[in-house]
Image (spheres, rainbow, N blue to C red):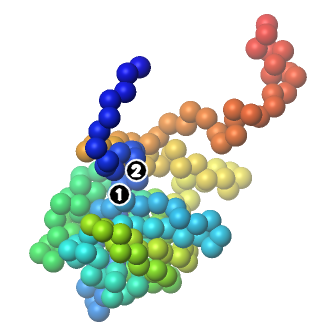
Amino acid sequence: MAHITWKPGTMLYPVPAVLITSSFQGRDNVCTVSWIGTVCTEPPMIGISLRPERYTYELIKKSKEFVVNIPDKKLVKAVDFCGVRSGKKYDKFAIAHLTRLQAEKVKAPLIAECPISIECKVIKILNLGSHHQFIGKVLLVHVDDALLDKRGALHLERAGLLCYNHGFYCAVDKQIGKFGFSVKKRTKEKTKSTLR
């Protein structure tokens, strides 16, 4: 396999495609964000990166809170719309047919149609250049109970979550391995059955 070199760029794909909700002084907004990731486990923290000219940037900077709403593939049109239109000019909730739900810890709303919503409080803002990163401490997580099995285990593959992959939206709905499977010891019965 031959490799070619490109100039430095953001080539870390795929990335999540999420809907960030924010609110300040009665003004709610929803914005699509793909520059997002886990930055700490204990305490749990998420980082989202926004350009300062985005309306969501202004609302989060003033309110110091946001909600990460993780959409499924049925919401792909809403996700795209919320990423290309400004909340300064449009009521994106109404146009994209998204339902607000009241959060428990923050004023920003949850989105009812999203199977997962994560309430966050901003603890730090980093000026990185074209984007500023908001580090949010996770206050509460909401999960659709349809994603739980009888034992209460979470099955995110059932949600058909979205990712953004170098200009395209893709669904994430197939498991191909469980964490640690490459080093897991096989039982003698399973080993024998594969040898037959």
Crowd around label 2: few <14 · some 14–19 · many ≥20 (10 Å): some
Disc 1 and disc 2: Cα gap in Å? 6 Å
| Residue on which the image places disc 1 | 34
Q: Residue at x 40, y 75 (%)?
A: 126
Q: Are the residues tagged 1 and 2 within 8 Å (C-beta)? A: yes
Tell how many labels: 2
Left or right: 140, with 81 as reference point: right
- Sequence-wise, the earlier of marks 1 and 2 is 2
Which is more toward the observer, 25 or 10? Answer: 10
Q: Residues within 10 Å of mark 1 (few under 14, many from 20)?
A: many
- What is the x, y in percent for residue 190? 80, 22
Q: Kindly indicate the quadrant of the structure image that contains residue 65.
A: bottom left
User: In the image, what residue occupies the spot 22% across and 72% down?
Assistant: 54
Residue farthest left in this picture: 89
Three-letter residue code for mark 2: Val
Q: Which residue is mark 2?
A: 15
User: Residue flagged by tag 1: what amino acid is it?
Assistant: Ser
Q: Which mark, residue 5?
A: none
Question: Along the line of sight, which residue is nearer the eye, 25 or 144?
Answer: 25
Badge 2 marks a residue whose secondary structure is strand
Q: Secondary structure at mark 1?
A: loop
Is 64 rendered above or below residue 137?
below
Screen quadrant of the N terminus? top left
- Where is residue 46 drawn, in percent x and y? 49, 68
Whether residue 142 is visible, yes or no, is: no
Q: Residue furthest right?
A: 188
Q: Is residue 47 left or right of residue 89?
A: right
